[in-house]
Image (cartoon, coloured by chain):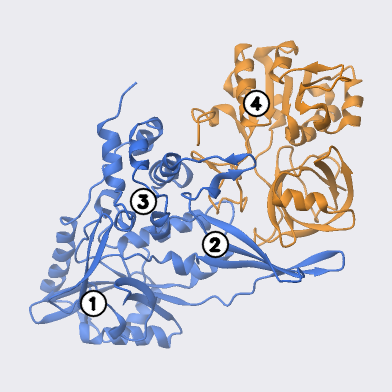
Chain colours: A blue, B orange
């Protein structure tokens, strides 16, 4: 049986995490969107807000209740903390005829991620696979990743572009958290069921006022998550998807979607699993000191595939195909998992509302068999 | 790969000697980092102070640990900057990265190396290895094509190799000046003239993709299968360790799974447009 945390005591959870030295980052309202940033109190959470999402459409609306987590994922994902958009790799300075490399000594922040959804836990697990578990380890990601404290939240509703059920990544958190909450608004009552996923989580829970849940409270929470399953805004049939996209390399749908794609890279920036980066070299005016920076990059840019003599993927068609085929097909070969967690961000934040689930459906339904 | 915690940090290597190969191509001898070793076909990321990094295959002799050799054609901003460096200067080195030519698979067989332009550089370590272990291989042909006679690299060495009885080294140029007495035509034309047993041959190809495509067609006409053909791929690379995503070719990361691939591992995508 889970524990119960009354909503009026949620603040204490934040305080305990802060007292333990964590920088608490959580959803908060900014510029008419729910984004992730450092918060000080529960007042910074998007209490009473919800979001309406559809292809190319995102609007915040007031809820009729005071839910703290009554919305779905916004344009940010936790990758901005674990795999920062801009990182200095090293500095170098001229010395005599040569130069010296000065490694970065970064004070790695201790983040407590507050309000992580199940699809996002899956996204973090995918980044673990890409940036830690392969032949090489990204020290920037690893140092940050090892220190995080994760407060997950089971989704009490699905958004208009959500399809985690199709991707088998939600809406209930099943791993990768220290604490998981389910928010319950039941008439006058407002509480969270709380479960621990780690020793770290149990230790934090021992410092906040909890009581054992009644069977009825636990059932209500389970029911809320079960209903979320039925509300998915989108559906993606993943049957044989790896081979489907490989064998449809020449499908006319790629031309069709390219006529709508602006190659703006929004989908890759909001995607919680897109990990591509580029590097930039800068020098001071005298040319005595140099720095090398890593920045998020996107396979939608023309330069991404540049080799001398030209760009390998010069058409929008080839770049969209690369992104979608990588995400849903090649990723499986590379990392034994889909690169898509069904969060729907790429659909919502596409300025022309291109919908990855619709593109897969179109290819599947109009496949010309050999 | 060097035993370093951060795979993105270069080691600094001094430039011992620079040799001009052609008007735009130079061979650099670097002092190798401690415990450095490479297998033929592997590459390093070379960093020029304040300018950037570029992936360059090692072109030296794998058995000679005292020098790390790269042959570089000045075509982009980083390679142009490297080619301006002189003996006594230094560059940053990360590596060696990637797959190699798997020469052991060619032991006991005939070997055909097909090189286009600067594509001879990543194959030169194979030539050194074969010549040092000549008895292990059957007939060995090196087929080398460049655009013009002025683009031929390693000229003095090629002249020596052409004087050997245990190596068939053929050279052709696309367009020749009036004083050229050698072959004229694409490198594919040399494949037919080479002598090898198609059933017992390993072919290694390095050059522009279009040149490799036509060479593959020619080799297949003679009876080679994709399992007998190895190709070295080039793609944009920022990290060389599978993080940056730039070098993807279908499911392959060229930096990690390549640059050398057995052809059947790249099919059916190899030769397709805009992969």
Chain under callout 2: A
For the N terminus of chain A, which image quadrant? bottom left
State how far apart marks 1 and 2 are (Cα). 33 Å
Find out whether the residues at labels 1 and 3 contact each other: C-beta distance under 8 Å: no
Dot 4 corresponds to which residue? B211
Q: Nearer the viewer, residue B146 or B267?
A: B146
Chain under callout 4: B
Where residue A4 appears, x then y in whole percent?
Answer: 21, 79
Where residue A84 appears, x then y in whole percent?
Answer: 50, 67
State how far apart marks 2 and 4 are (Cα). 34 Å
Q: Give neighbour class at mark 1: few <14, some 14-19, many 20+ (Cα, 10 Å).
A: many
User: Residue at coordinates 88% horizontally, 30% vertically from top-left?
Assistant: B155
Q: Give neighbour class at mark 2: few <14, some 14-19, many 20+ (Cα, 10 Å).
A: some
For the C terminus of chain A, which image quadrant? top left
Residue A68 image label:
1
Query: In this picture, is A71 found above or below A350?
Result: below
Dot 2 corresponds to which residue? A295
Looking at the image, residue B31 sits to the left or right of residue A203; the answer is right
Query: In this picture, is B127 found above or below A357?
Result: above
Q: Are marks 1 and 4 on the same chain?
A: no
Q: Secondary structure at mark 2?
A: strand
Q: Nearer the viewer, residue B89 or A257?
A: A257
Find out whether the residues at labels 2 and 4 contact each other: C-beta distance under 8 Å: no
Q: Give neighbour class at mark 3: few <14, some 14-19, many 20+ (Cα, 10 Å).
A: many
User: Residue at coordinates 48% horizontally, 73% vertically from top-left?
Assistant: A147
Q: Is residue A67 visible?
A: yes
Query: In this picture, is B223 found above or below B233?
Result: above
Residue that protrudes farthest toward the front in the picture: B178
Q: Are marks 2 and 4 on the same chain?
A: no
Find out whether the residues at labels 2 and 3 contact each other: C-beta distance under 8 Å: no
């Amino acid at each position: 049986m889970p524990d119960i945390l009354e909503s009026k005591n949620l603040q204490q959870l934040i305080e305990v995490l802060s007292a333990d030295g964590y920088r608490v980052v959580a959803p908060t309202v900014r510029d008419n969107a729910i984004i992730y940033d450092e918060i000080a109190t529960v007042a910074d959470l998007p209490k009473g807000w919800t979001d309406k999402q559809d292809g190319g459409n995102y609007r915040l609306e007031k809820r009729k209740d005071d839910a703290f987590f009554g919305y779905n994922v916004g344009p940010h994902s936790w990758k901005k903390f674990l795999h920062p958009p801009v990182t200095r790799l090293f500095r170098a300075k001229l010395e005599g005829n040569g130069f010296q490399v000065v490694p970065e000594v970064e004070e790695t922040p201790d983040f407590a991620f507050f309000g992580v959804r199940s699809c996002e836990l899956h996204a973090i697990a995918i980044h673990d696979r890409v940036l830690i578990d392969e032949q090489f380890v990204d020290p920037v990601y690893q140092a940050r990743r090892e220190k995080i404290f994760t407060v997950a939240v089971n989704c009490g509703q699905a958004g208009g572009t959500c399809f985690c059920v199709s991707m088998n990544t939600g809406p209930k958190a099943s791993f990768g958290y220290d604490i998981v909450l389910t928010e319950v608004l039941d008439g006058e009552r407002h509480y969270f069921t709380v479960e621990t996923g780690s020793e770290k989580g149990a230790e934090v829970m021992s410092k906040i006022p909890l009581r054992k849940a009644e069977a009825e409270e636990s059932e209500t929470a389970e029911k809320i998550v079960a209903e979320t399953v039925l509300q998915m805004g989108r559906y993606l049939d993943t049957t044989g998807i790896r081979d489907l996209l490989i064998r449809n390399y020449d499908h006319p749908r790629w031309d069709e979607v390219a006529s709508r794609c602006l190659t703006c890279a929004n989908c890759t920036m909001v995607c919680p699993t897109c990990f591509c980066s580029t590097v930039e070299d800068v020098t001071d005016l005298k040319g005595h000191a140099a720095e090398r920076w890593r920045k998020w990059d996107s396979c939608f840019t023309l330069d991404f595939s540049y080799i001398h003599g030209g760009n390998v993927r010069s058409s929008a068609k080839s770049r969209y195909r690369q992104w979608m085929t990588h995400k849903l097909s090649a990723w499986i070969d590379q990392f034994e998992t889909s690169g898509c967690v069904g969060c729907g961000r790429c659909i919502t934040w596409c300025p022309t509302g291109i919908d990855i689930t619709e593109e897969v459906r179109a290819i599947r339904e109009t496949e010309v068999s050999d | 790969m060097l035993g370093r915690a951060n795979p993105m940090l270069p080691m600094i290597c001094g430039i011992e000697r620079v040799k001009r190969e052609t008007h735009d191509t130079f061979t650099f001898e670097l002092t190798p980092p401690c415990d450095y070793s490479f297998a033929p076909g592997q590459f390093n990321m070379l960093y020029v102070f304040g300018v950037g990094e570029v992936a360059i295959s090692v072109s030296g002799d794998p058995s000679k640990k005292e020098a790390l050799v790269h042959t570089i054609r000045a075509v982009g901003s980083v390679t142009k900057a490297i080619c301006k460096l002189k003996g006594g200067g230094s560059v940053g080195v990360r590596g060696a990265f990637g797959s190699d030519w798997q020469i052991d698979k060619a032991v006991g067989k005939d070997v055909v190396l097909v090189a286009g332009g600067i594509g001879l550089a990543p194959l030169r370590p194979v030539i050194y290895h074969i010549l040092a272990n000549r008895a292990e291989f059957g007939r060995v042909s090196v087929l080398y094509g460049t655009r013009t006679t002025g683009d031929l690299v390693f000229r003095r060495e090629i002249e020596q190799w052409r004087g050997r009885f245990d190596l068939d080294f053929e050279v052709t140029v696309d367009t020749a000046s009036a004083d050229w007495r050698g072959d004229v035509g694409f490198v594919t034309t040399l494949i037919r003239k080479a002598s090898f047993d198609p059933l017992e041959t390993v072919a290694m190809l390095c050059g522009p993709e279009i040149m490799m495509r036509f060479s593959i067609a020619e080799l297949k006409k003679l009876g080679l299968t994709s399992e007998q053909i190895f190709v070295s791929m080039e793609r944009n690379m920022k990290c060389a360790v599978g993080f940056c995503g730039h070098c993807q070719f279908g499911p392959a990361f060229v930096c990690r799974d390549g640059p050398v691939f057995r052809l059947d591992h790249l099919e059916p995508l190899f030769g397709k447009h805009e992969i």
